[in-house]
Image (spheres, rainbow, N blue to C red):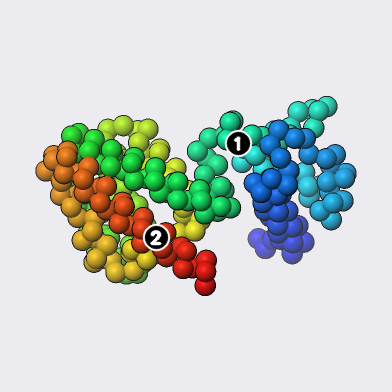
Amino acid sequence: MPVPPETIQRQSVVDLLAHRLRQDILSGTHRPGALLPPERDLAAGYGVTRTTLKHALSRLEQAGLLSTRHGIGTRIRNFLHEGGADLLPMLAAHDPGWLTEVFEVRRHIGALIARRAAARRTADHARRLDELLQAVRDAPDGDAAQLADIEVHRELARASGNRVYLLLTNTLFNAYLPVRAALRAPFEDSIAAADRLAPIVRAVADGEEDGAERAAEQYLRATEEIMLDSLKANRAG
C-alpha cells in the first residue's frame, strides 16, 4: 500500500529536526544537565510544530541523550556520566575523534578476543572461521569484503566462549558502520584483505594463544591506520 506523500514529508522533517537537535546537544549548544526551553519556545526556535518537536525529542530520549520528567521538563543527559556504549555510533558520526578512540578499543579488545578464541575454539569454530575467511577472499567488491571481515571477527568472539565479547564486538562495529563507506580502503582488494586476516584464523585454529593475540594486534593496527588515513582523505576531499 503506497505511503501518502504528506507522511513522507512529515517524517523527513522529524529526521532533520532530530539530527539538528542531536548536533546542537553534542556540540554543546544545549549543555549536559540543563533543561531544554519549553516546547512552545523550542518549536518556534527551530521553526517546526510542537507535534514534530515531540517526535524528534522522543527519538533523542530513546537514543539516551534526553530524559523527560512530567512537571519538570526535558533535561540534557550527561552522557559521559550516564550513557552507555549504545551512544557510540551517534558520537562517532558527530566527532571523528570518537572514531579514533573506538579503533583503539577495537585493537585492544580484538587482540584479547583472539587469544581467548585460540584457547577455547572448537573444531566447528575453526571450520566456520575458514569458511568466513574464504568469503572475504571471494567477495566481489570492497563493501562485501568489509562485511565478510566483520563476520570473521564475530566468529572469533563466539569462539572465545564469552558472550560479552560478542556484544562488545557488535557495539564496536556498529560505532563505525554508519561511516563504513569511507573506511573501505583495506578491503578493496579482497584477496589482500583475506591474506592479512589469515594469520589470525590459522593461529586460532592451531590453538596458539600468543600467536593469535600477536596476529590480531598486527592486523587491527594495520587496518586501523589504513581506515583512518582513508577517512582523513575523504573528509579533506
Give the x, y percent position of residue 15. 68, 55
Task: Specify which label sits upstream in the sequence, 1 or 2.
Answer: 1
Judging depth in this view, the residue of 221 and 140 nearest the camera is: 221
Q: CA distance from mark 1 to mark 2?
A: 27 Å
Circle 1 sits in a helix, a strand or a loop, which is it?
helix
Task: Please tell me in which quadrant of the rendered image residue 122 appears.
Answer: top left
Report the disc number at residue 213: none
Q: Which residue is mark 2?
A: 227
Judging depth in this view, the residue of 70 and 27 nearest the camera is: 27
- Is 18 drawn above or below residue 113 in the view shown? below
Mark 1 vs 2: CB contact within 8 A:
no
Badge 1: how crowded within 10 Å, few (<14), some, or many (20+)? Answer: some
* Type of the residue with mark 2: Met
Q: Which residue is mark 1?
A: 79
Identified at 31% across, 52% down, the residue is 221
Identified at 33% across, 64% down, the residue is 187
Give the x, y percent position of residue 18. 69, 50
Circle 2 sits in a helix, a strand or a loop, which is it?
helix
From this viewpoint, which residue is outermost toward the left?
206
